[in-house]
Image (tube, helix red, strand yellow):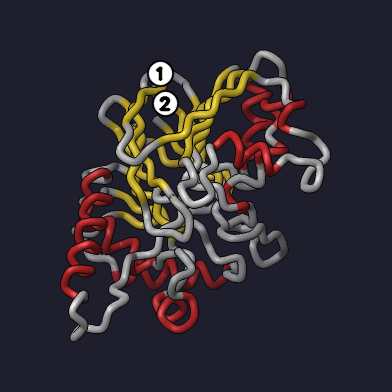
Amino acid sequence: MKVRFWGVRGSIPSPGPDTVRYGGNTTSIEVTTDAGHTIILDAGTGIRKLGLKLMAEGKQEVAICLSHTHWDHIQGLPFFVPLFVPGKDIHFYGAFDPVYQKELHTILSQQMEYCYFPVRELDLQANIKYNSLREGVTFTYHDATISNVMMNHPVLTYGYRVECNGKSVFFSGDHEPPYNIYDSDDTFHGEYQQLIQDKVSDICKLARDVDLFIIDAQYTEPELVSTRRGWGHGTFASGIAMAKAARAKHVAFTSHDPERTDDQLDRIAEKLKAQRRSHDPELTIAYEGFEYDFG
């Protein structure tokens, strides 16, 4: 199994001279199974170039697992060339929206209405199947097994575990570490804290002993605490803590803040390397083109 990152930014694409080395495309990750099947995790702008690669390879079928349907995780789909080609088989997996009562098919097709895009979903030529998943569902895609768990974000968001022949990867999508909304002396503080612990336990249980743990680390701890609490993203520190709890072997940080420059990410990488202990998981700040080969 192999993993390749095609987009590592969060919130909005951020091209320019300050993001050349890590990349400015939003989230899209390619997983290739041992048998050569393709699973795509999220469809941010990075999926455009991935689609061109799949076309060049003659790939006939892909599965696209969407953590959630915020724009930065689906905005590359109208430019994913295989969707326009007759005979290609595209399998979408993602969440039903319980707030607006919308199936995955409805959400994605609305993005391609004429008021947003010049080509309608009805004009796509590929064979497309939409699968709205409930939490805790496990399904197979050829030689891979895929499971999900609900994360903490302002819309229903799934983290995915992909496993193939004993190798595994967990992808968080966007995730903010849950925090207690009640004061310590409030009647409901203890009960709410237990809910938090149960949720974290559920996530770590699904991610237990994974080879590669891909986690949202859009902010630093000071940024999160000072102005970004409740925005639905994690930090490098919270990602490491969760990876340790899950006993992950390697952590890849992604969903970089669009304002974060290459030089700033380099400095963060140096700091994390200096702080890492020998028994901690390996750490990588993901960049476009980064490949993880499970061997």
Out of 216 and 70, give the one closest to the viewer. Answer: 70
Where is residue 144? Give x, y as percent: 36, 25
Residue assigned mark 1 = 142
Question: Which residue does the image show at 20% across and 57% down from the upper left?
Answer: 198
Q: Can residue 49 be seen from the camera position used here?
A: no
Q: Check whether the beta carbons of the residues at disc 1 and disc 2 lie within 8 A of each other.
A: yes
Residue 283 placement: quadrant: bottom left
* Measured Cα–Cα span from mark 1 to mark 2: 9 Å
Badge 2 element: loop
- Residue under numbered circle 2: 33
* In front of the other: 17 or 98: 98
Mark 1 or mark 2, whichever is nearer to me:
1
Q: Upstream in the sequence, badge 1 or badge 2?
A: 2
Residue in the foreground of this view, choosing between 249 and 209: 209
Estimate how packed mark 1 is, as few (under 14), some (14 to 19) or many (20 or more) residues with alpha carbons within 10 Å: few
Residue 247 in the image, given as x and y percentages of width and height: 21, 51
Camera-nearest residue between 264 and 133: 133
